[in-house]
Amino acid sequence: MSKTKTQGKTSQHKNRPGKRLGVKKYGGENIKTGQIILTQKGTKVHAGKNVGRGRDHSLYALKNGTVAFITKLGKKLATVN
């Protein structure tokens, strides 16, 4: 019999760093063109006026202005005014 356990199971499951998801600019904050408003998995918040959506569903500003989060028809929207 072996005196030590096999190394497969414990060595294969490494802790990985978090993805730093969440809101980067809150409502009422000023924002410049191209700055990220929030990073997310899926579309929990949709892109509104003057906001673009990246491949990974992150939202970013298309224009300088002020960030606002609104609810319209049951959907959360991020807009830049």
Image: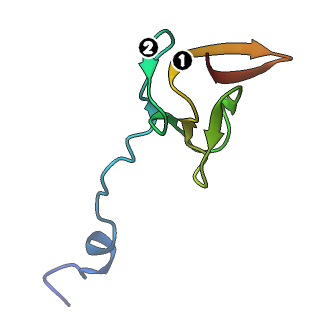
Left-right relation of 17 to 58 = left
**Element type at mark 2:** loop
The extreme left residue here reads 3
Q: Is residue 64 above or below residue 5?
A: above
Left-right relation of 52 to 75 = left
**Location of residue 22 in the rendering, given as x and y in whole percent from the top left corner:** 46, 32
Task: Report which residue position mark 2 lands on.
Answer: 29
Which image quadrant is residue 46 in?
top right
Query: How are the colours assigned in the image?
Result: rainbow
Residues at badges 1 and 2 in contact (C-beta under 8 Å)?
yes
Given residues 75 and 29, the one toward you in this image is 29
Q: Is residue 70 above or below residue 19?
A: above
At a point 68% along the width and 39% down the height, the residue shown is 43
Left-right relation of 17 to 31 = left
Which image quadrant is residue 1 in?
bottom left
Given residues 10 and 66, the one toward you in this image is 66
The extreme bottom residue here reads 1
Task: Report which residue position mark 1 lands on.
Answer: 67
> Looking at the picture, which amino acid does disc 2 mark?
Glu
**Location of residue 52 in the rendering, given as x and y in whole percent from the top left corner:** 63, 40
